[in-house]
Image (cartoon, rainbow, N blue to C red):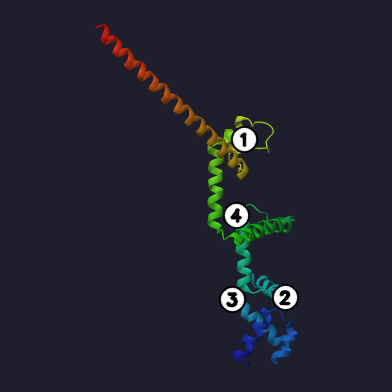
Amino acid sequence: MISNQVEELIIQNYIHGHPRDEIAEETGVAPGTVSNKINEWKRKLEAPDIEELRRFAVNMNKSGMTIKQCTKGFRFLQILKGLGIAIENDDIDSDLNSLSYFVNEIYKKCEEVGITPNVVTAWIDDLLYFSTENYGYLYESSKNHTERPSNENQNSEKRALTFVSVVSDFVEQKKRKLGDLSEQEKKIRKEIKEYELQNTDLIGKIKILE
């Protein structure tokens, strides 16, 4: 008869991947008894995938990874999957390297100037909205397009993110148009005054004739 403490030690060593003979030597229990205790523990659990869990625990121990770290890694992979980044094919390393470079560059540059992530996403939303609302001009101004898209794919093209340089050019063009409109307004106001003077003069002449 062995104590509960020894039984727990046998099971712990088994879960951590230690072989039967090594467990027997460490606990001072016969190898056959070690096997019996392990089998008895398995029957109590009624878990058909216990061996798979044991292999998982062994691999974690070999890699030096904790359960908490493993959980975080799984959550991160799920996030990548939600972003459309393949996580089960041969290109995973390439995808992760590209993502890591992108995030690292964005993070460092934003941190340098004190820009928070929510500000970045707000800017992107603004640019997308701006690109959609002013698609005609922005398309003509973009150097990345060589021919106008057909109607069937124009909707997808509208969501392309606009370069800030194109936006700046758009703003400058609008300023010039505003200046032209202002000059036209002055000209029209001047003409109205001239017409008013002519009208007053005509009214005076009509009164004289009466």
Which part of the image, by quadrant, shows the N terminus?
Answer: bottom right
Q: Are marks 2 and 4 in contact (CB under 8 Å)?
A: no
**What amino acid is found at the position of numbered circle 3 in the picture?**
Leu
Residue at the left extreme, as displayed? 210
> Which residue is identified by label 1?
139
Discs 2/3, front: 2
In what element is the residue under mark 1? helix
104, 202: nearer the viewer: 202
68, 96: nearer the viewer: 96
Task: Name the residue located 65 percent from the left edge and 80 percent from the top edge.
Answer: 39
Q: Residues within 10 Å of mark 1 (few under 14, many from 20)?
A: many
Which part of the image, by quadrant, shows the C terminus?
Answer: top left
Q: CA distance from mark 1 to mark 4?
A: 31 Å
> Which residue is identified by label 3?
45
Residue 204 in which image quadrant: top left
**What amino acid is found at the position of numbered circle 4 in the picture?**
Gly
Discs 3/1, front: 1
